[in-house]
Amino acid sequence: MFSFFKKKTVTPEPAPAAPAHVPAPAPVVPLPVAEAPLAFEVETAARPESKSSWMGRLKAGLSKTSANLSVLFVGARIDDDLYDELEAALLMSDAGMDATQYLLDALKRKVKEDKLLDAAAVKVALKELMTELLRPLEKSFELGRHQPTVMMISGVNGAGKTTTIGKLAKHMQAHGQSVLLAAGDTFRAAAREQLMIWGQRNNVTVISQESGDAAAVSYDAVQSGKAKGTNVVMIDTAGRLPTQLHLMEELKKIKRVIGKGMDGAPHETLLVIDGNTGQNALAQVKAFDDALQLSGLIITKLDGTAKGGVIAAIARVRPVPVYFIGIGEQIEDLQPFNAADFVEALLG
């Protein structure tokens, strides 16, 4: 398993030696993170063995999506039939019409300009174009610039939102970050119980009410995080469909109340989406981004889906950064999104 975050360190200049007649000053003890926040960012580079392990799992997870794409170039002729088959394969992967047409047009230009005659070379060209399309979705995920860093996490029921929160909390703890969770899903007792279980597993405090206002729970969590010097406050919100306008209005209210609890918060407004939902995932991104101005996405359950191409649709239509992708139930199966790795797993 490789790391999510890397610590930005600054090497201090050595202190001048004290004169012999003056007692040496006491060693400088760094302030705890609560008093002097440290910056962390997503670490996409990994040790070779960890990288290999992740790539193997990623390729396996995306195998259904890549099945119709990777075989097209085996012994293929560069003609209209190949482009037609590629168009169909991209659409079947839920890349969407906009991204599909963009990639096809760019590929045809490149084939002509570079005079590509070999199917393998055309495949390499497609990989380059797709990586270029997806690369703007890469973004460093930083912690420590705020004390606490407040994260508001949304998503429809079944997207894996609460499980993702548990995984993120575990990774943050592994890097010395104290975490507090808020059970802002006050509609479903099961959601609160699930978050409480994750809190117990990770030895993390969970702010919860059996019944009450989700905004009030969120506000209390922010105040508690500030008072205790917690590094990260993660607020789970009720799963809802973007068509439920009254519930989307409540999400806006929660965000406003969080801002009253701490200036500038939430510092991250994330949406968890299920990779199996294809173009519906794109509709969710549009609706939640319009309502909340999303700072990032987490795409789960890419393992076993034939619709992983939706990331291309997101890049083309609503390019909200993709912080993490998930391909399984284990903690190490949630990793930072890297465009080159994703395309390599998709096209082989």
Image (cartoon, rainbow, N blue to C red):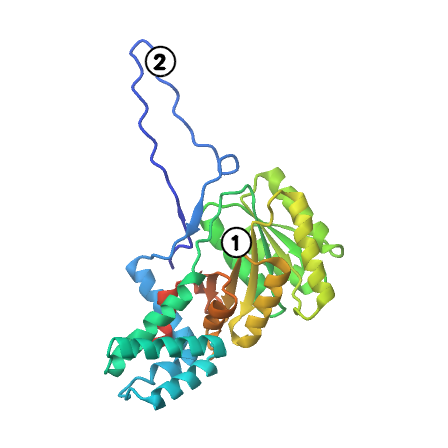
Q: Position of residue 132 (x, y in %)?
A: 37, 66
- Determine the image quadrant of residue 183: bottom right
Seen in the picture, residue 225 relative to 326 is either above or below; the reply is above
The disc placed on residue 23 is: 2
The disc placed on residue 346 is: none
**Residue 156 visible, this angle:** yes
Pointer 2: residues within 10 angstroms few (<14), some, or many (20+)? few
The one nearer the camera, 266 or 122, is: 122
Q: Secondary structure at mark 1?
A: helix
Seen at 71% across and 64% down, the residue is: 247
Quarter of the figure that contains the C terminus: bottom left
- Determine the image quadrant of residue 189: bottom right
Seen in the picture, residue 58 relative to 23 is either above or below; the reply is below
Q: Taking 1 as reference, is 251 left or right?
A: right
**Distance from Cα at disc 2 to Cα at disc 1:** 45 Å
Q: Residue furthest bottom?
A: 81
Q: Residue furthest right?
A: 212
Q: Position of residue 240 (x, y in %)?
A: 66, 67
The disc placed on residue 169 is: 1
Seen in the picture, residue 288 relative to 30 is either above or below; the reply is below
Amino acid type for the residue under numbered disc 2:
Pro
Quarter of the figure that contains the N terminus: bottom left
Pointer 1: residues within 10 angstroms few (<14), some, or many (20+)? many
Amino acid type for the residue under numbered disc 1:
Ala
Q: Position of residue 305 (x, y in %)?
A: 48, 77
The one nearer the camera, 215 or 196, is: 215
